Image (cartoon, rainbow, N blue to C red):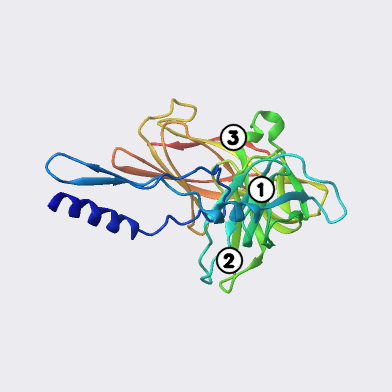
């Protein structure tokens, strides 16, 4: 009698369990099947185990039928050509909290992908190089829609030029930063891309940008504004004025360079331009007058020198 009561109680407790919830937002494959009544297995010693198979939920098929197919298309301009490659799409659920990004739902790298989405609001970002656009898309149940994204994108290619390039200085020694045209309250610009290489096409949203081009590792710097137009390639040539200078600490003019020398190159008004260590450091400097300070074996040696655009020279500091 006690054993029969234990089985009845186990079945009653199992029947009170909540039914599994239907999957939300994503299609699931489930085929109808007949569900056998719960079976009670009585283990030795009087304990019982009830095995219940999952009953298909009618809401699963209904949820799948509400999924919508959203085709994403990117355009260079409103009346321009469709972008066919190098696109990255990111689909986010819209956040309910202001200032907090929503959950990333999907990342796609096809040019014109079709994505299945549950009804709701999404923030979708299309990125084409450094050009991008993010906008809200509202998805209704069970529809097929095409969402165009107009990036208003153009290309920028920067080419360096200098009076000393033809004498052997590689253009790979040039790098440039692209900054926004707008400034914040402190007068600073935001960096769009840093240390970009010349000759490479950089995709940007149409607008005005500020370019800062650096030749070498010192102060041969040129900056300028450039306008990028949607659907067009803008080519900018940056002309650097620069000189290549090799520093030597010697015991006599034309002598062999001494090793273990620390160098400071400074402007006339005392601003540090470059530090280096070694027997023959070479730097690219803007034209002007400089003070070079050499430190060796606890002693300091100085010399002032002047360079002009296109110079390639050795500056010897003589150790008495």
Q: What is the quadrant of the C terminus in the image?
A: top left
Residue 91 seen in render:
no
Q: Nearer the viewer, mark 3 or mark 1?
A: 1
> CB of mark 1 within 8 Å of CB of mark 2?
no
The local secondary structure at tag 1 comes to: strand
Pick whichever of labels 3 and 1 is earlier in the sequence.
1
Which residue sits furthest bottom? 185
- Identify which residue, 25 or 315, lies in the foreground: 25
Residue nearest the viewer, comparing 5 with 21: 5
- Along the horizontal axis of the image, is 82 left or right of 13? right
Residue at image mark 1: 115
Q: Which label was assigned to residue 188?
A: 2
Label 2 packing within 10 angstroms: few (<14), some (14-19), many (20+):
few
Q: How many marks?
A: 3
Horizontally, residue 59 falls left or right of residue 65, namely left
Can residue 143 be seen? Answer: yes
Q: Position of residue 123 (x, y in %)?
A: 63, 60
Q: Which mark is residue 313?
A: 3
In the rendered structure, which disc, 3 or 2, sits on the residue that comes first in sequence?
2
| Contact between labelled residues 2 and 3, with CB atoms less than 8 Å apart | no
| Front of the two marks 3 and 2 | 2
Horizontally, is 264 left or right of 234 in the view?
A: left
């Amino acid at each position: 009698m006690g054993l029969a009561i234990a089985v009845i109680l186990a079945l009653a407790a199992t029947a009170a369990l909540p039914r599994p919830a239907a999957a939300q937002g994503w299609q699931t494959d489930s085929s109808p099947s007949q569900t056998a009544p719960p079976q009670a297995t009585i283990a030795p010693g009087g304990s019982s185990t009830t095995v219940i198979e999952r009953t298909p939920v009618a809401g699963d098929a209904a949820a799948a039928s509400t999924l919508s197919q959203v085709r994403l298309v990117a355009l260079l301009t409103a009346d321009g050509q469709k972008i066919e490659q190098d696109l990255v799409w990111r689909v986010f659920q819209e956040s309910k909290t202001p200032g907090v990004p929503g959950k990333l739902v999907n990342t796609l790298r096809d040019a014109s992908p079709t994505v299945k989405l549950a009804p709701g609001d999404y923030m979708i970002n299309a990125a084409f190089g450094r050009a991008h656009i993010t906008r809200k898309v509202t998805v209704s149940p069970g529809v097929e829609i095409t969402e165009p994204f107009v990036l208003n994108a153009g290309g920028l290619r920067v080419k360096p030029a200098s009076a000393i390039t033809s004498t052997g200085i590689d253009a790979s020694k040039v790098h440039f930063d692209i900054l926004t045209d707008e400034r914040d309250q402190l007068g600073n610009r935001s960096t769009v891309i840093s240390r970009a290489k010349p000759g490479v096409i950089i995709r940007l949203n149409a607008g005005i940008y500020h370019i800062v081009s650096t030749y070498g590792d010192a102060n041969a710097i040129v900056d300028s504004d450039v306008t990028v137009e949607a659907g067009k390639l803008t080519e900018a040539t940056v002309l650097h004025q620069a000189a290549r200078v090799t520093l030597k600490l010697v015991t006599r003019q034309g002598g062999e360079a001494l090793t273990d020398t620390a160098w400071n190159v400074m402007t006339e008004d005392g601003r540090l331009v470059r530090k280096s260590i070694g027997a023959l450091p070479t730097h690219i400097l803007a034209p002007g007058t400089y003070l070079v300070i050499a430190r060796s074996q606890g002693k300091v040696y100085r010399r002032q020198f002047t360079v002009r655009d296109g110079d390639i020279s050795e500056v010897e500091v003589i150790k008495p």
